[in-house]
Amino acid sequence: MRRYGFLFRIRPELMQEYKKAHDEIWPELVSAIRAVGIRNYTHFYREDGVVFACFEAEDPTRSLKELSAKEIRNKWEVVMEKFFVKKDRSYLGPEVTVLQEIFHLE
């Protein structure tokens, strides 16, 4: 399994609502995420709105491509769109910065 980490920003004033949405994540979305091989998917929040997210997958690029093609993911992103802080609003989903892994201790 390879680890994949990234950053994005949400509106700090909407953090509780963002958390609630994830506490009540749609079961169909969870199934879709698992079906594309994503495991151990986690979000961490910082008070200024920065979210660090990470997951594991055999092939993260393939998993993300497959997930982005799923209708349920796109419906979720439409609902989530109001939370994201981003410069380019021409696409659905957060504006992410992919992080390079430099250390891992098992």
Image (cartoon, rainbow, N blue to C red):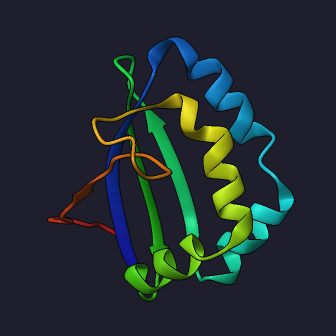
| 44 in relation to 72, above or below | above
Name the spot of residue 72 as percent of width and height, x first: 74, 64
Residue 50 image offset from top left, x and y in percent: 35, 31
- At horizontal 47% and vertical 65% (from top left) the residue drawn is 55
Picture quarter with the N terminus: bottom left
Image quadrant where residue 51 sits: top left
Q: Position of residue 18 (x, y in %)?
A: 62, 29
Residue 75 in picture, x, y percent from top left: 71, 55
Q: Residue furthest front?
A: 90
The residue positioned 73% from the left and 29% from the top of the image is 20
Q: In front: 61, or 77?
A: 77
User: Viewed as shown, does residue 32 lie left or right of 48?
Assistant: right
In the displayed structure image, the side of residue 103 where residue 27 appears, left or right: right
Q: Nearer the viewer, residue 63 or 79?
A: 79
The reply to whether residue 74 is visible in this rendering is yes
Q: Quadrant of the C terminus?
A: bottom left
Residue placed furthest toward the right: 27
Residue 38 visible here? no
Looking at the image, is 8 positioned above or below residue 50? below
Instruction: Please tell me which residue is depicted at 59% across the width and 83% down the height of the picture.
Output: 37
Q: Residue furthest top?
A: 13
Residue drawn 56% across and 64% down?
40
**Residue located farthest toward the left when viewing the structure as drawn:** 102
**Numbered circles on residues, count:** 0
